[in-house]
Amino acid sequence: MASLKDKTMAPAQEQSLVYVGPNMGGELPMQQFTVFRGGLTDAVKTRCEQDLEFAALFVPVSGLSQARQALERTGSELHRAYGSVWTAYSAKRTEGK
């Protein structure tokens, strides 16, 4: 798997991407394992540009099995990215209360 700093989003027309991050509500509602065919939404693209850890949670559908294994492996890049996004989302969620 590419490192966060080396990660580049492939052109959307070439492959479908699946979001493997945590379920989130709020300003950018996301559900884990949502498949994006034909490109990411503008809001998702913007967030990916601003947050490389969030961007790392979009993997090609063909790599979903490997990504799920990496999510379970403590210390893996995807495990860390998932935790970081979850922590940031949780902080925003509790601020709104």
Image (spheres, rainbow, N blue to C red):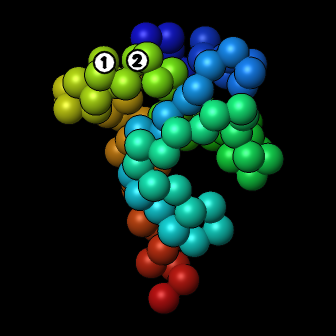
Q: Is residue 81 above or below residue 11?
A: below
Q: CA distance from mark 1 to mark 2?
A: 5 Å
- Residue 45: x %, y % from top left: 73, 40
Q: Residue at x 60, y 38 (%)?
A: 36
Left/right of residue 18 with respect to residue 78 in the rendered view: right
Asked which secondary structure carries label 2, the reply is helix
- Residue 19: x %, y % from top left: 49, 39
Task: Name the amino acid type tagged 1.
Answer: Gln
Asked which secondary structure carries label 1, the reply is helix
Do the CB atoms of the residues marked 1 and 2 lie less than 8 Å apart? yes
Q: Residue at x 69, y 46 (%)?
A: 44
Task: Name the amino acid type tagged 2.
Answer: Gly
Crowding at mark 1 (Cα within 10 Å: few <14, some 14-19, many 20+):
few
Q: Quadrant of residue 96?
A: bottom right
Which residue position is annotated with label 1?
A: 66
Residue 63, which numbered label?
Answer: 2
Q: Residue at x 50, y 11 (%)?
A: 2
Q: Is residue 90 above or below residue 59?
A: below
Q: Is residue 20 above or below residue 78?
A: below
- The quadrant in which the N terminus is found is top left
